[in-house]
Each structure stands twice: as structure tokens, then as C-alpha cells.
Amino acid sequence: MQAKESSHQKPSFLKSIFQMKCPRCRRGKLFQNYSAYNFKHTFSMHEACSVCAQKFNMEPGFWYGTGYVSYALTVAFSVATFVAWWVLLGISIYDNSLFWWLGINAALLLLIQPWLMRLSRTIYLYFFVRYEKNYLETQPQEFDY
Ligand SMILES: [Zn+2]
């Protein structure tokens, strides 16, 4: 009884995204390998959720839209590092600080790229698949325009 009750608790939205869990039940894993830096398997996803059977690749070419998400994340990340740099180190047009920020920001972006691409796929999928409280009793969601 206790286990059943806790299985109906709704896991937090942000936590589920950052843990890259299935958007429908927020319990099954999206990716087969824990690390995004195992480059052979960066994009190895489960065909469907092991918990609720939700399909992840909802139609051929579904992941193309991920580009917009990763672009938005890249911009957001760059704004964040810019503001942090500005506050912590200062940015001036009279020295090289702007170029240092540009270079280091680019290096950081490159470094987090595999993780960022995974995160983009996760967020993209969350646009289309809603959380379902009774994920065990209902049918997985189909792609819906
Ligand atoms: Zn699921």
C-alpha cells in the first residue's frame, strides 16, 4: 500500500528534466547510458519507456526540432556566463576582457555540448508529451499536431 501511494507522487518537473526521465511517467530513463560523454552512445535512447511504454522517437525525423531548443539553451548559457563574467571579473571595451569571455564561453559550450544536446532532446520531448498520473492504466501518447 505504501509503495502504491508513493508511486502516485508526481516527481518534480525540473528534476525530471535534468535527470532526463520520461516525460509521461517521470520515472523511466530516456538514455541508455548514464554518461553523455561516452560519444558512441551520446544519442542512444531507449525505444520506449521501460516504465510506462511511452515511445520517445515519436515519428521519423522527430528530433530535428531539437536544434531550436539547443540554440535557445546555448544563448541562455552564453547570457549567463556573460553576466557572471561582468559581475565577477568586469567587462570593458578598453581591454581584452570581452575576447577572453568569448573564448572561454566557446570552450565551455564545446565542453558541455554532449550534455546540452541530450538536455535539448529531453526538453523537446517534454513539449509534446504530458505527465500522466495514471501512466500504468492509460495508453502512451501518440504524436499530435
Ligand atoms: Zn515513462
Image (spheres, grey):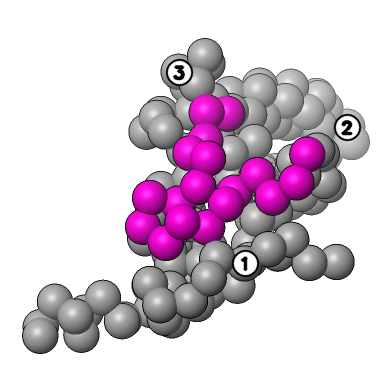
Element assignment for label 2: loop
The residue type indicated by label 1 comes to: Gln
Q: Which residue is at 55% across, 65% downward?
A: 140
Visible residue check, residue 8: yes
- The x and y percentages for residue 118 are 58, 39
- The x and y percentages for residue 124 are 70, 54
First reached walking from the N terminus: tag 1 or tag 3: 3
Ligand 1 near label 1 (Cβ, under 8 Å)? Answer: no
Q: Which mark is residue 2?
A: none
Furthest residue toward right = 93
Q: Is 83 or 33 nearer to us in this picture?
A: 33
In three-dimensional space, the C-alpha distance between marks 1 and 3, rounded to whole angstroms, equals 30 Å
First reached walking from the N terminus: tag 1 or tag 2: 2
First reached walking from the N terminus: tag 2 or tag 3: 3
Q: Quadrant of the C terminus?
A: bottom right
- Circle 3 sits on which residue? 38
Element assignment for label 3: loop
Horizontally, residue 116 falls left or right of residue 132, namely: right
Horizontally, residue 61 falls left or right of residue 21, namely: right
* Residue 25 drawn above or below residue 114: below
Q: Does 125 appear in magenta?
A: no
In three-dimensional space, the C-alpha distance between marks 2 and 3, rounded to whole angstroms, equals 42 Å
Mark 2 and mark 3 in contact? Answer it, CB < 8 Å.
no
Q: Nearer the viewer, mark 1 or mark 2?
A: 1
Q: Which residue is at 57% across, 52% downward?
A: 55
Q: Which mark is residue 141?
A: 1
